[in-house]
Image: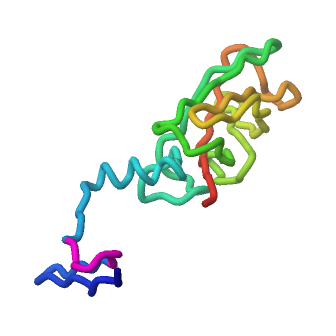
Amino acid sequence: MQWARLTRRRRPVKKALTWASVATPFEVRPFAMELTMCMRYYEKSYPINDIAGATTGGPLTWGIISGNRPVHTIYFKVVKRSAPTFNYYNPFTGAISLARNNDASTNGTLTLNHVSDNTVAFWWNSGNTGQVQGSSISIHYTADIEL
């Protein structure tokens, strides 16, 4: 076998490198399919055009209860190839590894309980300032599996 020649089409020009004796047509997949396939390796809570650390877009928000530190769970949109590296960001400052207490207007840290291929669980650290019953926290996140 030999590498087939790059296929060319009239506008728009698409090229494919194929291991075959003849060229095969270029496969055009729908954007939603491509995005879902990519999300096995990378996912974020930000709007699609925003980068990690941006201070735009609607963050994820949960209520917190003083004393018994409830565990909050994020279910990933797509099951990952393996357990990802999970990073969270303050939605108001963009700072990594800081969450926002919306009611006290303070920042604090989270403790990750577990990270798996389809979920991450965490709680608001009890040493953070401004933790009172009924307060809420907000974060943005990324989940990344390096190839």
Q: Overall secondary structure of the magenta stretch?
A: loop
Measuring from the top left, give residue 31's x and y in whole percent: 29, 55
Task: Indicate the quadrant containing the N terminus: top left, top right, bottom left or bottom right.
Answer: bottom left
Measuring from the top left, give residue 5's x and y in whole percent: 27, 87
Residue at image coords 85%, 25%:
126
Residue 84 in view (yes/no): yes
Name the side, left or right, on which 82 lies relative to 22.
right
Q: Nearer the viewer, residue 142 or 4?
A: 4
Question: Image quadrant of residue 123?
Answer: top right
Q: How many numbered callouts?
A: 0
Q: Nearer the viewer, residue 13 or 92?
A: 13
Residue at image coords 56%, 45%:
81
Residue segment shown in magenta: 17-24
- Where 124 falls versus 94 (above or below)? above
Question: Image quadrant of residue 86?
Answer: top right
Residue 19, magenta (yes or no) = yes
- Where 143 falls versus 129 (above or below)? below
Point out the residue furthest to the bottom here. Answer: 5
Measuring from the top left, give residue 37's x and y in whole percent: 41, 51
Residue at image coords 50%, 47%:
40
| Colour scheme employed for the rendering of this structure | rainbow
Point out the residue furthest to the front here. Answer: 1
Name the side, left or right, on which 98 lies relative to 142.
right
Q: Nearer the viewer, residue 72 or 134?
A: 72
Residue 32, magenta (yes or no) = no
Question: Image quadrant of residue 120?
Answer: top right
Residue at image coords 35%, 55%:
34
Residue 87 in view (yes/no): no
